[in-house]
Amino acid sequence: MKRRDFLRTGSTAFAAAAGVTIIPSTVLGKAFGSVAPSDKVNLACFGIGHRGGEIIKALHNTGLANVVALCDVDMGAEHTLDLIKRFPDVPRFRDFRELFDKMGNQFDAVSVGTPDFSHFPITMLAMSQGKHVYVEKPMARTFSEVELMMRGAEKYKVATQMGNQGHSEANYFQFKAWKEAGIIKDVTAITAHMNGRRRWHGWDTAMARFPDGQPIPETMDWDTWLGTAQHHDYQKDFVNGQWRCWYDFGMGALGDWGAHIMDTAHQFLDLGLPYEVDPIKIEGHNPFFFPQASTLAFKFPERGAMPPLTITWYDGMNNVPEVPEGYGVSELDPDIPPASNGKLQPSKLNPGKIIYSKELTFKGGSHGSTLSIIPEEKGKAMAAKLPEVPKSPSNHFANFLLACRGEETCRSSFAIAGPLSQVFSLGVLAQRLNTKLVFDRDKKQITNNPLANALLVGARPRAGWEEFYQL
C-alpha cells in the first residue's frame, strides 16, 4: 500500500481490515523527532494567526508533520506574519476552496483553527476528499452542523480530533482510571465554572442592531471569511477573536471553555445529550451577543446503573458558584494557553469543576488538571486505595498525527467530541432565547419551542455555500 493511500484509510478502517492491535510508534522504537520526511503527515493549515497559528506550531513540533500549505482569509495581516516567516516557502492561499482545488493531491490532513462558525465547510470538504481533520473546539456552531460532521467522519473513515488538548493529558487518564476503579461513581451533580473576564463584558446590553460596517482591510477576503454565514458588513468587532462575542459567529464562554472543563466527565460518565437545559440566570440578555453572566442547568437521565446527573454551568465575572466546605485554594493550570492579550484575567475562582457523588466530592481545574478529593484530609486517607494513573503516550497533537498514520486512535474524535459540542450548542440556544429547552434525546429535537428547534439547524447558508451541507 502506498504511503498516501495508507494515510487516507484512517486508523479505524485499517485496524478493522487487518485484524491487528495498533501499537504506538514509541513501543516500536521510533522516536517522534526522527521520522523521515517521507513518512510524515503532509498538513494543510487553515487559519494561521492567533490560536490557529499555535495549533500549527504544536503539530509541527511533534516531528510528525510536514506543513505543505497555509490558508488565511487575511493573509499578510500582522497576526499571520509569524507563521509566514516560519514557513516562508510554503504556498499561501486566502480561499480554502482554491487550496483544495490546486493542492488537493499534495496533503493528507488539515488543521482548522478558524472562527467557530467556519469550521464546518472546511472540515466537510476535507473529509469528503479523504483528509484527516484536526479542528479547534467547539466542533461547529450549530447542533445540525456537528451532526453532519459526525456522520461525515463515519462515512469517510478519516481520523478526526477536536482541539481540547487536555483530553490527552493527566486529567483524561486519571478520570478514566478512577472511574474504572470505582473511585468516581454515583455522580449526581457537577458544577462547572469559568468566571474570567470575556471580550463582551461591559458592552451595552440594550444594543438593538449590529454595529455599522467599516471599510474592508485591503489584505482581507471578507466574502470567504463570511463563508456560510448570513451577510454582514465588515466590522473590526467581528474579527480577530471578537467573533466569539456574537451568536452568529461564536459559542461564547461555554463553547470556548466547556470542552476544557466538562470533557472527561461527559465521556466517562456516558452523558450523551441532556433532556433539559434550564437557564437559571441570564444577566444582561441581548439577542446579538452573549450575556454578561449566565447559569445553565444541563439535566441528564439515568444511564444504566448511573443515577441522573445535572451539570450546572456558571460564567460571568461575579457569577461565582458556591464551593463545598474544605474546598481549599483554586490553582491555575500552567498549561492553559494565554488569552490574545498574553495573560489570563484574574478571577475569584479559576476555571474548573466540582464533582459531587454520593460518597465523595472532587475538585478539578480545566484542560489537563487532575482531580483531588476534598476535603484534603479525606483524600490523604484514601491515597493508598487510589489506582495508578498511566502517563500519556502522546500529547493531543501527536495523538492525532499518529492516528493519521494508523498507530493510535484519536482521544477526542468526532464520535466523542460531537455529542459534547452538541451539549454546548443547546446551552447557547438557551442563552440566546433566554428560555428553558426540553430535548428529545432519541429524535434529537427540542419539543417545547418551535423557534429553538428550528435553530438546531439555523439559517439557510448563503447562496453558493449550500454544497458543503450535501457532502
Image: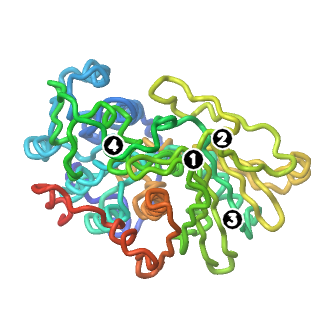
Counting residues from the start of the chain, the first of labels 3 and 1 encountered is 3
Question: Residue placed at 39% from the left, 34% from the top?
Answer: 51
Disc 2 secondary structure class: loop
Q: Earlier in the sequence, mark 3 or mark 4?
A: 4
- The tag on residue 180 is 3
- Which residue is under mark 4? 115
Q: Give the quadrant of the N terminus.
A: bottom left
Position above or below: 265 against 383: below
Quadrant of the rendering where the C terminus is positioned:
bottom left
Type of the residue with mark 3: Glu
Residue at the spot of label 2: 318
Dot 1 lies on which element?
strand
Report, in whole angstroms, how far the alpha carbon at label 3 lies from the one at label 1. 36 Å
| Mark 3 or mark 4, whichever is nearer to me | 4
Checking the image for residue 293, the label placed there is 1
Mark 1 closeness class: few <14, some 14–19, many ≥20 residues within 10 Å: many
234 or 189: which is nearer to us?
A: 234
Which class describes the residues within 10 Å of circle 2: few (<14), some (14-19), or many (20+)? some
Q: Which of the marked residues, 3 or 2, is nearer the chain's N terminus?
A: 3
Where residue 11 sits, quadrant-wise, is bottom left
Let me know if residue 147 appears in the view: no
Find residue 223 and report its horizontal and vertical position in percent.
15, 41
Disc 3 to disc 2, C-alpha distance: 37 Å
Amino acid type indicated by mark 1: Ala
Question: Measuring 31% from the left and 23% from the top, which residue is drawn there?
Answer: 79
